Amino acid sequence: MFVLMLIISYLFGSINSAIIICKLFALPSPRSVGSGNPGATNVLRLGGKKAAAITLLSDVIKGLIPVLIAHLLQLSSVEIGYVAVAAVIGHIFPLFFGFKGGKGVATLIGVILGFYWLIGVIFLIAWLICAAISRYSSLSALIATVVSATCIIFLYDFGTALPFLIIAMIVIIRHHENIKRLINGSESKIGQKKHA
């Protein structure tokens, strides 16, 4: 059952909401314009708040559902953690879209909320505080990712936290261009229209 859930979770993650929503809204492909990233931030630039909100919610839900199913099947917390990894990997390397997906943050929110809602709340609070101070969406996402993954160590144990630490590393790697821009001062702030 665990292996089957890994496959199901990956397939859920592979549903790229940004690309689908842009097609439904008759918008350009998010992979061909803007930042080139098929995620909610780029959809916001292309189609406005409504399209971006639907994209964000869809990406969260596709992470949430497999983890909730894993809970219902009474998988162990460690197994559920790896189901979460599969969903995020599916988002980043989607089977249905040539293995070229987004950066995984919205799907990460979904899997964390599904794993333990309190950690999801911690993620959102960390993001909001960092965004309010720095005005950088990318930096806020990175800090919130690390904070929430670290919290699992204290609320559970290292073995349970390991899958989420793996997700954090993947998300950080996916943000390498953002990190470069943060370092050299060229990263766009919330409300600007350059980078995802």
Image (cartoon, helix red, strand yellow):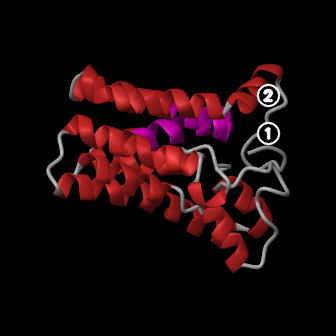
Left or right of 103 on screen, residue 149: left
| Mark seen at residue 58 | none
Q: Amino acid at mark 1?
A: Ser
Question: If the image is split into quadrants, where does the C terminus sit?
Answer: top right
Q: Which residue is mark 1?
A: 188
Dot 1: element:
loop
67 up-or-down from 176: above or below: below
Which residue is depicted at the point 38% across and 44% down? 84
**Decide: marks 2, 1 in contact (CB < 8 A)?**
yes
**Is there any visible trace of residue 121 in the rendered image?**
no
Left or right of 87 on screen, residue 6: left
Q: Which of pointers 2 and 1 lies earlier in the amino acid sequence?
A: 2
Residue 187 spot, x, y in % from top left: 79, 34
Which residue is depicted at the point 77% across and 79% down? 26
Q: Which residue is mark 2?
A: 181
Towards the viewer: 48 or 114: 114
- As for residue 129 lying within the magenta part, the answer is yes
Q: Amino acid at mark 2?
A: Arg
Q: Which residues are magenta?
A: 123-144
Left or right of 119 on screen, residue 60: right
Residue 150 spot, x, y in % from top left: 37, 24
